Every structure is written in structure tokens, then in C-alpha cells.
Image (cartoon, grey):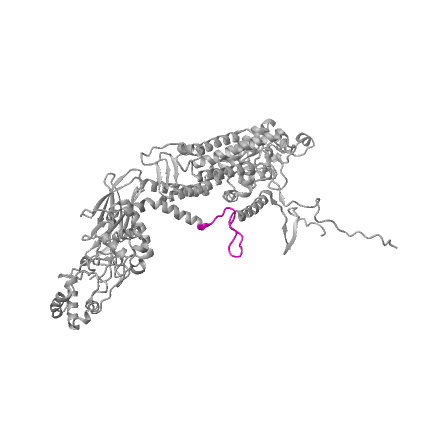
């Protein structure tokens, strides 16, 4: 090298690099900058020693602090369990009606039950518990098996028509297609439809009343008001699980569909079931 | 013939040898500002005392807000998400007041800078104030400029060690007190100070003290002027705020040049001589380590200490003060034009003086009128507009609010009697530190019924709810309407909340949704 290039204007040496006549000045860095730079290097080395960093064949170095975000989560969950402890103990000790009557416990149970609902129940009942055809809407005030908090708890614990639970809610409407004639089915469907205000063909409705009294009143009641003991729906209200109207009713009379709900008591445990019962009860239709 | 045993030396020199090697970094050139007294120094002492007093004492001021709220005048209660400032209490959703204050601070800075230059930098910036404080300690322990230079250059003796250790120890103590004062803004100061010394305060308190101690010590003690020169964006921004009518600390070379240390000799030789005697007093006092005579520069924080230094020298020499002064660029340019005969010659002091002594009355001087110009009016009106808007909003703001969230999933529910029900989450905000009983009433939808989860409703679609002081109360309200009364898919009605004692009220217009075909 024949020596340094000195920039004429600034009197500073250049790096010798030149682009289209523009040269790069070789100003030294400020000392604090350089020190900061070295500190970051030292910090980085220290960090890789203290924390998990270097990839190995199947895992990574664990670092002398043995830090793990999974452990953090585990600890936080454990702390949350401890924090919930006194509420959970109270829920354990009290009945669902007592829980629903207590401001603080109700708030806790609704929050916890809402979370459990999102995980376990929304698949059938929908994310807003609004249900769909064949799956009951839990917001309304129509209850097949009873809408008191205890009744809801019982339903959740043991399920409905759930074969492997001996205490399950059980009822089975016969397929009347094999029992009564198609004409009678038309008549009784017209009658049932008229109970909730629909104007039907009187030629069908009047004989339909007799068909109903002979075949249906045993479960659904003389006035067709249903029976929660048997899970027999109220046929006079505005809510139809399998659809309103004579055609839908006739289909259900001929070969009834019957929903199955699993028993959740064993799977979720008593406290979670209580939380779910209070939550469902709070959705607006609880009795 | 050449002797074959001798080789011709090639023309080469070591590229990398101790003599030619350049350092990888530029070491900081230490600045040893000299102590000076004068008008601006006195003013700076005053500003320093006031700003330090505000910083350290504010958390200890008390303000009675009754039994349900803290009695600390200024408190940022992060845990409960409340901010207290004397008679004002701010909830998180009212954070726009803080945003508004920051906007005002920004515009205020523009206003100040466009009139009196970088006054923020020179007088009130915490960096300036704390560096000043640290310099007081440094001078008290190690002496003034010359003593400090000598001590710094000297070898490490026991005396130097003692002085240095005590200086840094006091700096660290000040830094710790600075960090310590900060945390009192975030919790009840009297109880927190006991906890801090008992070791029972929250870890974040100690971390905050530690971080702020480190930054105060590093920035105020070790880095000093480098913070302003290298790290701070302010000098760059403020430079854009200055114009030809802004006051800046100016070396008036139209009367100072040609500077001479041997004025008499030069005068005797018939040469023109300016007022500057090149005594370097302005350089010695500068905390930024610059020479103001090089002109306006980014590093200058306009602390005006060079004005004090120069005025002292001018007094001794029996010359007019103000060789270095606050001046505007337009005045400076006018005077410079006069001194150089419009740029025709180099500075000639005789051109600005009449018969060799008193200043010519053609010279431009700063006049207060120059503060009032379109630019400052724009800043002033923007500042006032934001301030008045904030004030109006503060004086008329509601301390009782209702927020309503309409259930969207499901939007409506058909009940067994065919009526339609909608659900609403109603939040009552009691924003005063006193318990209140709030009456919630439903207005509109004449045939609709209202029910509340967990509360037995009276029949008249209205209920009284006790709300804790400074808290939010959430209600789950259901409204149901008979199918035959529903005449539209979406109907509106109102939730009205009222405090019967203070007559404060708020309303929310809610929507009642129904399915397309109601049976």
C-alpha cells in the first residue's frame, strides 16, 4: 500500500473504497459505542450459558438456570389452582341452588362453567348454547328434563339415554308408524300442531284429539303439557326440537328421533358439573 | 558490477505497526467545566432547585378524597388502573387526557423553542439538571477545573483514590435517591418507604430503583454531554424549530473579531482589533466542551454559561457586556453586514462603532415584539385549543356511565310462549370514590319485560343497584317481548341509569333483535 488516502475536505483518512468518486471516511467509532458492542457480546455468551440455547441432537442445552417456559406455565397453573381453591371447596360443599343464590360463588361458577362449556358442550349445543335441530337450545325456558339447577345438574352428570350410565335419563317414544295408521298420524299431527296456535284442517284436528288421548296422553299428558320426569316435551309451546309444522310432527310420530347426551359426571368431576349447571341455569331460562 | 551479496531494499513499510495503527475507537475527550457565576447561572440554580423539589416532593403531597380513595395527591395506581392528580381522577378509558397533555407538551416545546431557542435543553431537561447536580458534587470534592484536570492527569495516589471513590459514592447515592423517588409515584409513598427499607416492597420496586440508579449514574455522571450529542433526538428535532427570529446563544463576532490576545500591541500597529481577547473563558465553562465562537452548533444546549463567563471578562475589561449573548439570527446577520460593509471586507469593529468607542445606533437589538410572529401565534393557538378542549372535556365529563353489550350469540331466543328474548351485558361505571345506588330503567318497548340474573326484579322495569365506590358493576339483563308486539326485526329502546341523589344520569340506546318471521 502506498499509504493512506486523506480526504481533502475533512482531513480524515478514507477506507480506500470508492464509488463513482465518493470515498468512505474512516472515522473511528466512539468508545462508548464500542464498549456497548462488546458488552452485548459478553451478554450473549452469558445468556447462552444461563438459558437454553445450543441445539443438540434431540433437544437443546438446558442452561444453568434450567429455565423452561413449560415449567413457568406449570407453576402459573398450580398458582391458579391454589387461588381457586377456596371457591372450589365452597362449590364442593354447597348444592347448586345455594351456589346460584350466592353472588360471589355464582360469578365464579358462571365463569368456570362458561369455560368448561366452551370445551365440552359447544360441539352439540353450539357456542352460544343456542342449539340446533335435534340439539336443545339451552337459553330458552323449555326444558325436556327440567330447568331447575338440580335437574340440570342431574342431566349433565348422568346424560340422556346414555347406555353405560345406569342412572341416565331414560325414555323412549315408540315409533307410531307401526302402531297407528297413516291416516291417524295425519290426524294427530294436525291436532298437535293446532295446540300451539296453528290453524289446521278441522276434519283432521277433531279426530286427532281422540288419537292423541288414546296413544299420546299417557306420556305427554291430557293437555299435552309434557312431563319432565319422562323427558316428554310440552307440545303446546312454541319450541320444537325437531321442527314445527304438521309434516315435521308427523315424521317424529312415525319414527321418532331420540337424542343421546353422554354422562359427564365421571369425566368432568362433581365441581365442574356444578359449574356447568349454574352456568346453563344462568343463561336465561333457568327455573 | 553490483555486489551480488547485496539486495536492493524494496520500497515497503509495515501497514500495521504501533506507529501507524489507528485506534478502533475514539476515546471520549473529557470535559472539565469551570465554575462560573452570573445572572444565567443564578437562574439555572433556581430552575434546578424548583425542578428537583417538584420531582422529589410531589409524591409526598396529600389530597383528601374521602375514605374510599387514596389520599396521595399524585398517584399512578397501576394495580387498580386509576390515575389520581389532585382533584382529577382518570380511568384507563380517559387516557386521552394524558395524550392531550403530551400533545400540549409537544406544541409547548415548539413554542418555547421558536421564541427562546433550546431553553428546554439548557435549563429544564432532566439530563441537564442532573449533570449540573453531579458537577456540584464533583467540584466540591475535587475542586474546580484546573484542579480536576491536574488530578485526572496525575498518577493514582491515595488522595486521588479517596477523592474518586467519594465522588462516585455520592453520585451513586444521588442516583439511588433519584430512582427511589420515582417509585413513590406508583404507590402510597409513606407506607412504601417503610417497605423499601424493610425489604418487603414488591420486586418491581427494587428493579425500578436499580435500573434508574444505573441510568442516572451512567447518563448524569459518566456520559454527560455525550447523551445530548450522540443519543438524544431532541437537538435534531429542535433545530427544525428554530428560525431567524429565535433567540440563540450567539458569539457576536461582528464586534469580537479580529480577536487578539495582544490588543494593545495590535492597536499600536494600526490593525483593527475586536472585543474578544481570546481568553477562552467561554470554552472553559462549557459543559458540552465546545467553543461557541465556532457559531451555532448541534452540541450547544444553550445553557448560557458562556454568556456569564464572557460578561464577567467584559466587565473587568471595561467593555460592553454581550459579546456572547442571546441574539436572533436576523439581528446577527444585520449587524454582521454592518461590520463587514455588506460583506465587502472582513470584520472591522470600527464599522459598528461611532468614533471608535460607543456602538453605532444602527445596530439591531432584540425586541420583545419579535416573539409575536405568525409562527408563534400558530403554536400558541394550537396549544390553547388543545388545552381548552381538554379543560372543557374535564369539566363536563360524566362520572356515571353505562355501557351495554348486546348478546350476539344467540342474538335472540324464542321462549316457550313464543315471545322473543334478547340478552344484554350492562356495565355501570361509578367513577367517583363514593358508593352510590344507581337506578337502571328500561325505556321504550312498552310490552317488553326485563329480568336480571341473580336479582329479583320489581315489575316496573326498573331496579336499584348498589355500586361500590370507583368500581364497575356488571349486570346480565334479559328483555323479552311478546311475538305479536314485534313489528320489526330491529327495534330500539333505552337503558337509562340515574343516581337519584346527584341527578347524574346516562343513557344507552340498545337494539332489540327478532327473527325475520315471528310466528
In the image, taking residue B478 as reference, residue A1 lies left or right, namely right
Q: Is residue A192 above or below residue B230?
A: below
Front residue of this view, candidates B334 and B105: B105
Residue B238 shows in this picture = yes
Find residue B259 and report its horizontal and vertical position in percent: 64, 34
Q: Position of residue B390 (x, y in %)?
A: 37, 42
Question: What's drawn in magenta, residue-wise?
Answer: A51-70
Q: Is residue A32 above or below residue A147?
A: above
As drawn, the residue found furthest toward the right would be B1
- The number of discs equals 0
Q: Report the residue that reaches farthest toward the bottom.
A: A182
Residue B310 visible, this orientation: no
- In magenta stretch: residue A259: no
**Is B491 on the left-hand or right-hand side of B60?**
left
Above/below status of A209 relative to A274: below
Q: Quadrant of residue B185?
A: top left
Q: Decide which of B514, A238 is in the foreground and name it.
A: A238
Dominant secondary structure of the residues highlighted in magenta in the image: loop
Residue farthest to the front? A166
Residue B509 % position (x, y)? 26, 51
Q: In terms of depth relative to the viewer, which is nearer, B165 or B142?
A: B165
Residue B131, position as x, y percentages in the image: 53, 35
Q: Is residue A54 magenta?
A: yes
Residue at x 85%, y 54% (from the top left corner): B4
* Left/right of residue B281 with respect to residue A183 in the rendered view: right
Q: Quadrant of residue B78?
A: top left
- Along the line of sight, the residue nearer the viewer: A193 or A217: A217
Amino acid at each position: 500500500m502506498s499509504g493512506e488516502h486523506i480526504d481533502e475536505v475533512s482531513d480524515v483518512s478514507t477506507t480506500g473504497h470508492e464509488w463513482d468518486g465518493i470515498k468512505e471516511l474512516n472515522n473511528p467509532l466512539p468508545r462508548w459505542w464500542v464498549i456497548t458492542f462488546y458488552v452485548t457480546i459478553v451478554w450473549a455468551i452469558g445468556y447462552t450459558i444461563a438459558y437454553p440455547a445450543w441445539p443438540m441432537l434431540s433437544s437443546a442445552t438446558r442452561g444453568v438456570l434450567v429455565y423452561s417456559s413449560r415449567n413457568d406455565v406449570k407453576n402459573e397453573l398450580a398458582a391458579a389452582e391454589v387461588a381457586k381453591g377456596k371457591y372450589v371447596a365452597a362449590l364442593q360443599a354447597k348444592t347448586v341452588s345455594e351456589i346460584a343464590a350466592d353472588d360471589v360463588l355464582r360469578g365464579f361458577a358462571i365463569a368456570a362453567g362458561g369455560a368448561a362449556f366452551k370445551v365440552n358442550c359447544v360441539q352439540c349445543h353450539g357456542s352460544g348454547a343456542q342449539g340446533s335441530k335435534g340439539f336443545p337450545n339451552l337459553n330458552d325456558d323449555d326444558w325436556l328434563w327440567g330447568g331447575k339447577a338440580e335437574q340440570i345438574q342431574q342431566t349433565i352428570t348422568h346424560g340422556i339415554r346414555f347406555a353405560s350410565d345406569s342412572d341416565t335419563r331414560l325414555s323412549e317414544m315408540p315409533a307410531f308408524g307401526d302402531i297407528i295408521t297413516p291416516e291417524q298420524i295425519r290426524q294427530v299431527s294436525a291436532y298437535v300442531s293446532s295446540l300451539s296456535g296453528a290453524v289446521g284442517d278441522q276434519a283432521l284436528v277433531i279426530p286427532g284429539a281422540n288419537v292423541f288421548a288414546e296413544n299420546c296422553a299417557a306420556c305427554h299428558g291430557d293437555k299435552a303439557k309434557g312431563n319432565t320426569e319422562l323427558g316428554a316435551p310440552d307440545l303446546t309451546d312454541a319450541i320444537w326440537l325437531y321442527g314445527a309444522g304438521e309434516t315435521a310432527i308427523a315424521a317424529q310420530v312415525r319414527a321418532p328421533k331420540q337424542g343421546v347426551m353422554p354422562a359427564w359426571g365421571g369425566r368432568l368431576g362433581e365441581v365442574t358439573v356444578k359449574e356447568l349447571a349454574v352456568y346453563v341455569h344462568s343463561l336465561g331460562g333457568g327455573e | 558490477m553490483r555486489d551480488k551479496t547485496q539486495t536492493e531494499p524494496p520500497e515497503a513499510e509495515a501497514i500495521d505497526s504501533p506507529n501507524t495503527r489507528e485506534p478502533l475507537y475514539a476515546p471520549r475527550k473529557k470535559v472539565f467545566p469551570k465554575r462560573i457565576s452570573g445572572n444565567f447561572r443564578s437562574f439555572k440554580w433556581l430552575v434546578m432547585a424548583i425542578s428537583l423539589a417538584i420531582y422529589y416532593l410531589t409524591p409526598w403531597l396529600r389530597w383528601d378524597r374521602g375514605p374510599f380513595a387514596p389520599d396521595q395527591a399524585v398517584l399512578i395506581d397501576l394495580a387498580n388502573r386509576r390515575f389520581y392528580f389532585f382533584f382529577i381522577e382518570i380511568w384507563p378509558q380517559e387516557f386521552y387526557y394524558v395524550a392531550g397533555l403530551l400533545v400540549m407538551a409537544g406544541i409547548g416545546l415548539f413554542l418555547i423553542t421558536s421564541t427562546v431557542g433550546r431553553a428546554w435543553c439548557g435549563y429544564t431537561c432532566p439530563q441537564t439538571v442532573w449533570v449540573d447536580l453531579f458537577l456540584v458534587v464533583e467540584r466540591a470534592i475535587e475542586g474546580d477545573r484546573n484542579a480536576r484536570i491536574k488530578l485526572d492527569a496525575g498518577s493514582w495516589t491515595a488522595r486521588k483514590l479517596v477523592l474518586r471513590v467519594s465522588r462516585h459514592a455520592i453520585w451513586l447515592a444521588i442516583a439511588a435517591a433519584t430512582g427511589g423517588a420515582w417509585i413513590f409515584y406508583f404507590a402510597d409513598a409513606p407506607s412504601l418507604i417503610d417497605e423499601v427499607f424493610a425489604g418487603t416492597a414488591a420486586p418491581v420496586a427494587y428493579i425500578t430503583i436499580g435500573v434508574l440508579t444505573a441510568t442516572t449514574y451512567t447518563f448524569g455522571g459518566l456520559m454527560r454531554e455525550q447523551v445530548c450529542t450522540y443519543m438524544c433526538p431532541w437537538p435534531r428535532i429542535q433545530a427544525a424549530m428554530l428560525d431567524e427570529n429565535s433567540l440563540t446563544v450567539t458569539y457576536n463576532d461582528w464586534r469580537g473579531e479580529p480577536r487578539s490576545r495582544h490588543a494593545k500591541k495590535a492597536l499600536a500597529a494600526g490593525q483593527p482589533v475586536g472585543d474578544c481577547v481570546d481568553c477562552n473563558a467561554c470554552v472553559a465553562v462549557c459543559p458540552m466542551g465546545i467553543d461557541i465562537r465556532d457559531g451555532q452548533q448541534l452540541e450547544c444546549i444553550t445553557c448560557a454559561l458562556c454568556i456569564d463567563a464572557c460578561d464577567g471578562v467584559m466587565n473587568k475589561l471595561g467593555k460592553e457586556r454581550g459579546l456572547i449573548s442571546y441574539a436572533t439570527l436576523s439581528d446577527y446577520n444585520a449587524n454582521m453586514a454592518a461590520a463587514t460593509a455588506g460583506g465587502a471586507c472582513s470584520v472591522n469593529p470600527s464599522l459598528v462603532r461611532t468614533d471608535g468607542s460607543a456602538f453605532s445606533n444602527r445596530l439591531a437589538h432584540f425586541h420583545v415584539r419579535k416573539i409575536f410572529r405568525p409562527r408563534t401565534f400558530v403554536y400558541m393557538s394550537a396549544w390553547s385549543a388543545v388545552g381548552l378542549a381538554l379543560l372543557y372535556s374535564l369539566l363536563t365529563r360524566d362520572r356515571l356511565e353505562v355501557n351495554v353489550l348486546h348478546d350476539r350469540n344467540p342474538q335472540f331466543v324464542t321462549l316457550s310462549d313464543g315471545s322473543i328474548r334478547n340478552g344484554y351485558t350492562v356495565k355501570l361505571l361509578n367513577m367517583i370514590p363514593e358508593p352510590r345506588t344507581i337506578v337502571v330503567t328500561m325505556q321504550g318497548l312498552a310490552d317488553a319485560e326485563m329480568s336480571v340474573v341473580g336479582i329479583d326484579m320489581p315489575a316496573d322495569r326498573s331496579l336499584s343497584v348498589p355500586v361500590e365506590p370507583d368500581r364497575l358493576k356488571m349486570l346480565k339483563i334479559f328483555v323479552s317481548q311478546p311475538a305479536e308486539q314485534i313489528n320489526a326485526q330491529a327495534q330500539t329502546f333505552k337503558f337509562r341509569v340515574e343516581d337519584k341523589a346527584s341527578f347524574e344520569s346516562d343513557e344507552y340506546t340498545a337494539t332489540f333483535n327478532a327473527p325475520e318471521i315471528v310466528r
